[in-house]
Amino acid sequence: MADDKAERPARKVTTGRVLRTERLTPHMIRVVLGGEGLAGFRADEYTDHYVKLLFAPAGVSYPQPFDMEAVRRDLPREQWPTTRTYTVRRWDAEAGELTIDFVHHGDSGLAGPWADRARPGDELHFFGPGGAYTPDPEADWHLLAGDESALPAIAVALEHLPAGAPAWAFVEVAGPEEEQRLDSPGDVKIVWLHRGDAPYGEALVTAVRELDFPDGVVHAFVHGEAGAVRDIRRHLRTERGVPLSRLSISGYWRLGRDDEAWRSSKREWNEQIEAEEAAALSS
């Protein structure tokens, strides 16, 4: 235990305070954070910036001010915070406000219930931001596809498309009540896919497969449930011939796995997909 703690490098923890909340749709809650703890925070390089939120286990409270290194040094591992990764929906540097949108499905999970209970003044600690994707201004057209978990990142990407840039955006949600207004300076065709009682990702995979691809070089962003992302990746790579360099693609979550189980198996999952893909491309 001591060696494990000693080997873990220190990371900066940022603390925000809830300023306000808003229920955007029946299952999407917006939380806006502010406060002095956000001084020096930046999230203006990528459209898929994310932060790793820290949630204390039930019944555990930490000395204030919060010190992650002290938590790791002084407390057993089962009392360390649990992390959940969320997209930065908006960072307003002038106002010092960080906006995060949460999918909320009742009492299940950690982050959604926290957002539902959040009130002004509540603290939220997090690592980050990270990120890697921004729509390529040189691409001939853009493809964005995902479910509710990817909707915030898709929304940010659409807002940062070059003026007039052609794009298709496929977003799978439970039903019409979960649609949101999405703005973009690009020439965007937004297709809302209503899942209803169908399996997660089924409508999304079908829509991408049936798309009449425009001519030219595409830059694609595909994120969401891992099974659907896998099927879309195979289609784009092996049937459409899209190189990996033109793809930002990853499973944010996996049906039937909690977050910890998915993170522990994600590397093996990705390696298997890459091996199958290589075999298909070489045949």
Image: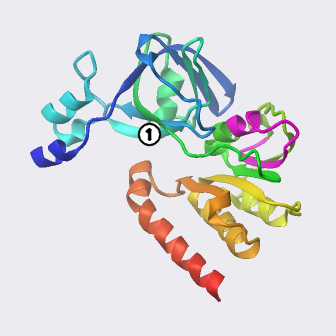
Q: Which residues are magenta?
A: 155-175
Q: Answer with the quarter of the image where residue 263 lies.
A: bottom left
What residue sits right under mark 1 in the picture? 84
Furthest-left residue in this view: 2
Relative to residue 93, is residue 78 drawn left or right?
A: left
Mark 1 residue element: strand
List x then y, in percent, for residue 190: 84, 44
Q: How many marks?
A: 1
Indicate how the structure is coloured in the image.
rainbow
Q: Amino acid at mark 1?
A: Arg
Furthest-bottom residue in this view: 283
- 226 or 167: nearer the eye? 167
Residue at (35%, 38%) from the top-left corner?
82
List x then y, in percent, for residue 112: 52, 33
Q: Is residue 195 visible?
A: no
Q: Answer with the quarter of the image where residue 73 lies.
A: top left
Q: Quadrant of the C terminus?
A: bottom right
Relative to residue 249, is residue 142 drawn left or right?
A: right
